[in-house]
Image (tube, grey):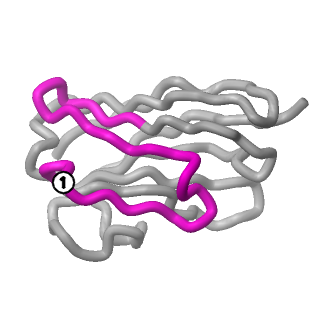
Amino acid sequence: QVQLVESGGGLVQPGGSLRLSCVASGGTISWYDMGWFRQAPGNERAWVAALTASGGNKYYADSVKGRFAISRNNAMNTMTLQMNDLKPEDTAVYYCAAKSKRNRDMGVASAYNNWGQGTQVTVSS
């Protein structure tokens, strides 16, 4: 089981950018599909983006398509989420997650085995 730690959250103005990082320890992420989820106050955890273990296939929620980019570096055991043109509705705690059952249920939170503790992203003027 890998342990995941997110960083890079913060306060940004609308239209700004942030880059979130997820660092894994205790094992290699190369065996895992990985994803980003977010949870705003009063809302359920929502899927944002995911990519397969090799990084060859990437998937995005409609709400972030064209603005966010997910990537991974298996050699460095890291995953990133580049977020551009941020909107107030992007405000949430962002979580990275990993799952061992590959190539299916990429946007389903319950399919993920390992979670980080989350990093807060606030988009406000």
**Residue of label 1:** 56
Q: Looking at the image, which is closer to me, 92 or 60?
A: 60
Residue 14: x and y in percent read 80, 36
Residue displayed at 31% across by 62% down: 112
Tag count: 1
The image quarter containing residue 96 is: top left
Q: Quick check: 7 left or right of 101?
A: right
Asked if the magenta segment contains residue 69, the reply would be yes
Q: Residue furthest right?
A: 125
Asked if the magenta segment contains residue 116, the reply would be no
Residue displayed at 62% across by 44% down: 93
Q: Quick check: 31 left or right of 89?
A: left
The quarter in which the C terminus is drawn is top right
Residue 11: x and y in percent read 74, 25
Q: Secondary structure at mark 1?
A: loop
Q: Looking at the image, which is closer to me, 25 or 15?
A: 15
Label 1: few (<14), some or many (≥20) within 10 Å? few
Residue displayed at 11% across by 36% down: 27
Residue 59: x and y in percent read 38, 62
Residue 60 sits above or below residue 67 on the image: below
Q: Quick check: 12 left or right of 116?
A: right
Residue segment shown in magenta: 53-80
Please, what is the three-letter code of the amino acid marked with disc 1? Gly
Residue 33 sits above or below residue 29 on the image: below
Residue 79: x and y in percent read 31, 36
Q: Quick check: 88 left or right of 115?
A: right
Residue displayed at 26% across by 31% down: 78
